[in-house]
Image (tube, helix red, strand yellow):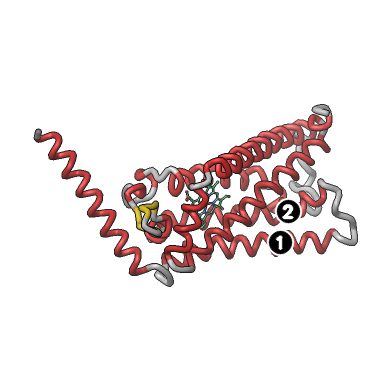
């Protein structure tokens, strides 16, 4: 059984299967994030719900991480095999019918991976050093009588920083490039593409990639241009400042004692 995954075809199955898992997460994540266009309680309640089910959350996280590790390591092995099989490259520079996206899957994948690392530091681990504003763990709100993390406030404030918005935009362009080739290529690897279906599947892959791109970009764009959340951002900024000053005063108080 493990032999099949050592063959080139087996590796392509692995890439396609894990790619579908990662794509499903990205689609679900966008649908969840689009709730930022609703009232603050909507996305805060959703985030709180996800975090209140640790068994579910951690099973999903472990499954995603496994899919990511297999996807990236198989891509690295396939790239090395392809280079070893064609050390000189194609006459004329590029293979016939290839596109920028198909030739740079590894590069776009590497940038997306770097983005995910930054994104985790930004919104999941909430490291103050990477957001240009302060300690997002201090952002809290009251929901149904409980104090919960203010994910809405974190997003609204987080996307007011121009270079953060720029980083997200660059990542979304590369995600678009990666998926516009990757989705059609997964259909091909899984044997679902023949000459009748090929153009339709190619178009469907492109349409889904563009929809994801527009959906993800709409969030930082709407926030940065103050289409949504401008007042809430000011309130959150003041709360963050007050919480930071309060903590600094506490530290000074302890030192003085
Ligand atoms: C504008 C675009 C995006 C926004 C606004 C956004 C927002 C968020 C937020 C708020 C969280 C933290 C949720 C919480 O802890 O309650 C999060 C987590 C995460 N995001 Fe995104 N995201 C975006 C794009 C992406 C993309 C494109 C990917 C993948 C390619 C991605 C992958 C993840 C992952 C892996 C997590 C960690 C989930 C976990 O807690 O296990 N995000 N995102």
Nearer-N-terminus badge (1/2): 2
Q: Residues within 10 Å of mark 2 (few under 14, many from 20)?
A: many
In the image, 206 versus 246, the foreground residue is: 246
63 vs 13, left or right, is left
* Alpha-carbon span between mark 1 and mark 2: 8 Å
Q: Quadrant of residue 209?
A: bottom right
Residue 184, above or below 78: below
Which of the labelled discs sits on residue 206, or is there none?
1
Judged from this view, the residue extending furthest toward the bottom is 227
Q: Residues within 10 Å of mark 1 (few under 14, many from 20)?
A: many
Judged from this view, the residue extending furthest toward the front is 145
In the image, 24 versus 81, the foreground residue is: 24
Question: Which quadrant would the C terminus be assigned to in this image?
Answer: top left
Q: Residue at x 71, y 48 (%)?
A: 20
- Rendered location of residue 62, percent (x, y): 60, 38
Q: Residue at x 60, y 43 (%)?
A: 60
In the image, 83 versus 14, the foreground residue is: 14
Tags 1 and 2 in contact by the CB under 8 Å rule?
yes
Which of the labelled discs sits on residue 183, or is there none?
2
- Rendered location of residue 225, percent (x, y): 42, 69
Q: Residue at x 65, y 63 (%)?
A: 210
- Rendered location of residue 88, percent (x, y): 76, 36
- Rendered location of residue 223, percent (x, y): 43, 65
Q: Residue at x 32, y 52 (%)?
A: 133
Q: Quadrant of residue 226?
A: bottom left
Mark 2: which secondary structure? helix
33 vs 243, left or right, is right
22 vs 97, left or right, is left
Mark 1: which secondary structure? helix
């Amino acid at each position: 059984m493990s032999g099949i995954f050592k063959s080139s075809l087996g590796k392509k199955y692995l890439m396609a299967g894990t790619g579908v898992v990662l794509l499903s997460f990205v689609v679900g994540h966008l649908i969840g994030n689009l709730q930022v266009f609703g009232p603050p309680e909507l996305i805060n309640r959703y985030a709180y719900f996800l975090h209140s089910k640790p068994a579910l959350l951690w099973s999903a996280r472990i499954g995603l991480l496994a899919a990511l590790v297999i996807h990236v390591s198989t891509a690295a092995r396939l790239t090395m095999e392809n280079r070893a099989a064609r050390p000189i490259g194609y006459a004329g520079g590029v293979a016939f019918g290839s596109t920028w996206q198909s030739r740079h899957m590894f590069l776009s994948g590497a940038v997306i991976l770097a983005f995910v690392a930054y994104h985790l530091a930004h919104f999941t681990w909430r490291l103050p050093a990477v957001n240009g504003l302060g300690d997002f763990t201090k952002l809290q709100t009251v929901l149904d009588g409980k104090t919960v993390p203010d994910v809405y406030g974190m997003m609204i404030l987080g996307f007011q920083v121009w270079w953060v918005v720029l980083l997200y935009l660059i990542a979304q362009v590369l995600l678009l490039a990666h998926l516009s080739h990757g989705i059609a290529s997964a259909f091909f690897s899984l044997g679902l593409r023949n000459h009748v279906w090929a153009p339709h599947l190619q178009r469907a892959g492109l349409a889904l990639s563009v929809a994801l791109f527009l959906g993800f970009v709409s969030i930082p764009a709407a926030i940065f241009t103050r289409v949504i959340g401008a007042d809430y951002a000011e309130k959150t900024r003041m709360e963050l400042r007050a919480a930071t000053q309060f903590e600094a005063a506490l530290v000074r108080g302890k030192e003085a004692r």
